[in-house]
Image (cartoon, helix red, strand yellow):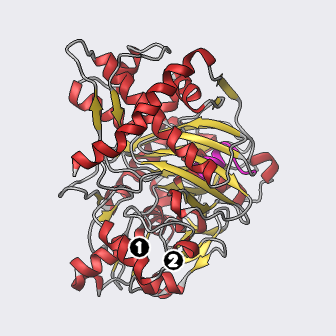
């Protein structure tokens, strides 16, 4: 019998990525399919779950076309990683009751305050403050604004778990993804009856809890036939996107960490225990491996900020970055990148972005620099919050689509005063982690599966660049309060 190959899917916000991985860890093929976000009202962010299934179908079919036939016949398992916090509401027959509210949906801020008043100890149980992006406040919003619909809710699934259910017929979640609901006792890795009751829900409305590498079922025969796969393809529980990204680069030991320049920005560090620090809006979640946790600083706009600039200037991200060199710009505007609100450290979904210091001589390149610098400064705020929570990264890898940019990674290394290591295949991210979880579900040794990929390039802090960047970072931080007040 040939060595087993596996599939990894990553259900993102702007698209779904699929990868084919060999038993020895080689990336054999990859494909993706786009997704769009609907914003029917201010602060709303929604997707239709049926679009996720269609994207998975399109991506896997494209992946098959790019794979060698022998490798495709050797597929034995798959796992799904995905965007966290989204709310998929199902009735007793399994029908979707409304569009899914996503991680960057900010409508439920008032409900966060209500939840914390109802259950003051909730922050310590959930190891996080109630935040508008989390799942629990969204359900309380539905209970108050769409009460008749709320009464019909039989199950609540997270986005990747709805997709796993469609593919396998199994209704479950994993502890890493469940950590972002505000219904999980993060230290105990179990559903909390107290947190659920504060939202008007019970454990019977939650999916079963498993760990990321657990084998949970089989790909349905109709999908095996449609995709030309073997008759028996095992399905693993999978993980939330950030935990999966960590699995993909071997960030599984305390102190291992990464920065992710995806739609949102993430500064992730593995820990050996649950460390709650809700007062600094530092997330403390279960990792995708049993007995392991992690902390995160999360910035809601990262590569999406550059995409926004592209949308208003008519240039794509690659074109915007191509005009930049690796030198800081003293005369560039300052950019506060809060296009979709902010989490760490401000916990403010109503925050809005600002461009300060525009002049008649400001160019498109100046604006592009300001955007990537503003995102880097947000990461500096995130690192400051993590350190206040008692977590210091021993090593930081660079992941996500933005990690393709040498200019951006050098700027981040200078701002954070931390070396950044870009592994080979950094842009694959959570899909690679999902594939590795599928490998673990087959019993492949963790010592072989959870290796750090080869490092393609290292970015070291440059002392000569830091005085100017420190001065601009200080101005960036001073601008928060007055800009926030004027945006109200």
- Percent from the top left, x then y, of residue 466? 56, 22
Q: Which residue is mark 1?
A: 136
Most foreground residue, 310 or 57: 310
Vertical side of 426 occupied by 113: above or below: below
Residue drawn at the location 66% of the way across and 42% of the way down: 249
Disc 2 element: helix
Q: Which mark lies nearer to you, 2 or 1?
A: 2
Dot 1 surroundings within 10 Å: few (below 14), some, or many (20 or more)? many
Vertical side of 366 occupied by 351: above or below: below
Q: Is residue 487 visible?
A: yes
Taking the image as shown, residue 319 lies to the left or right of residue 442, namely left
Q: Distance from label 2 to label 1 (Cα)?
A: 11 Å
Q: Which residue is mark 2?
A: 122
Vertical side of 417 occupied by 484: above or below: below
Most foreground residue, 156 or 260: 260
Q: Is residue 7 visible?
A: no
Numbered label attached to residue 62: none
Most foreground residue, 331 or 481: 481
Q: Residue 150 occupies which quadrant of the picture?
A: bottom left
Q: From which residue to which does the magenta span run?
A: 243-253
Residue drawn at the location 61% of the way across and 41% of the way down: 258
């Amino acid at each position: 019998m040939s060595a087993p190959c596996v599939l990894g899917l990553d259900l993102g916000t702007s698209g779904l990525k699929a990868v084919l991985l060999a038993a020895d860890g080689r990336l054999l093929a990859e494909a993706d399919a786009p997704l769009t976000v609907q914003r029917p009202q201010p602060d709303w962010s929604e997707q239709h779950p049926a679009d996720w299934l269609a994207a998975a179908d399109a991506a896997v079919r494209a992946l098959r076309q790019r794979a060698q036939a022998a490798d495709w016949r050797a597929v034995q398992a798959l796992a799904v990683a995905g965007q966290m916090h989204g709310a998929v509401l199902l009735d007793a027959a399994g029908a979707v009751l409304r569009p899914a509210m996503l991680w960057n949906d900010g409508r439920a801020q008032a409900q966060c305050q209500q939840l914390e008043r109802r259950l003051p100890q909730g922050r310590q149980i959930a190891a996080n403050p109630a935040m508008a992006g989390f799942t629990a406040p969204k359900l309380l919003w539905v209970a108050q604004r769409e009460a008749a619909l709320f009464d019909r809710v039989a199950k609540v699934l997270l986005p990747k778990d709805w997709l796993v259910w469609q593919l396998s017929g199994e209704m479950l979640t994993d502890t890493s993804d469940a950590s972002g609901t505000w219904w999980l006792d993060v230290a105990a890795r179990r559903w909390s009856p107290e947190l659920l009751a504060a939202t008007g829900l019970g454990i019977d409305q939650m999916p079963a809890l498993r760990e990321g590498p657990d084998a949970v079922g089989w790909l349905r025969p109709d999908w095996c036939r449609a995709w030309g796969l073997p008759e028996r393809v095992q399905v693993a529980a999978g993980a939330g996107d950030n935990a999966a990204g960590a699995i993909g680069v071997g960030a599984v030991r305390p102190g291992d960490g990464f920065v992710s320049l995806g739609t949102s920005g993430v500064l992730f560090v593995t820990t050996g225990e649950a460390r709650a620090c809700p007062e600094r809006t530092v997330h403390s979640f279960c990792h995708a491996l049993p007995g392991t946790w992690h902390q995160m600083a999360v910035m809601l706009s990262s590569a999406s900020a550059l995409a926004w600039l592209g949308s208003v200037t008519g240039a794509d991200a690659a074109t915007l970055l191509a005009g930049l060199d690796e030198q800081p710009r003293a005369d560039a505007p300052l950019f506060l990148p809060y296009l979709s609100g902010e989490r760490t450290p401000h916990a403010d979904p109503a925050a809005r972005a600002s461009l300060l210091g525009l002049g008649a001589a400001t160019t498109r390149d100046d604006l592009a620099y300001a955007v990537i610098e503003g995102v880097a400064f947000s990461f500096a705020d995130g690192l400051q919050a993590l350190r206040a929570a008692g977590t210091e990264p021993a090593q930081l890898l660079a992941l996500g689509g933005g990690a393709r940019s040498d200019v951006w990674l050098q700027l981040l290394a200078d701002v954070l005063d931390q070396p950044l290591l870009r592994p080979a295949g950094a842009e694959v991210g959570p899909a690679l982690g999902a594939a590795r979880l599928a490998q673990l579900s087959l019993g492949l040794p963790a010592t072989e599966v959870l290796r750090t990929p080869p490092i393609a390039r290292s970015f070291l802090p440059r002392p000569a660049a830091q005085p100017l960047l420190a001065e601009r970072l200080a101005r960036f931080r001073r601008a928060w309060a007055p800009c926030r007040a004027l945006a109200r």
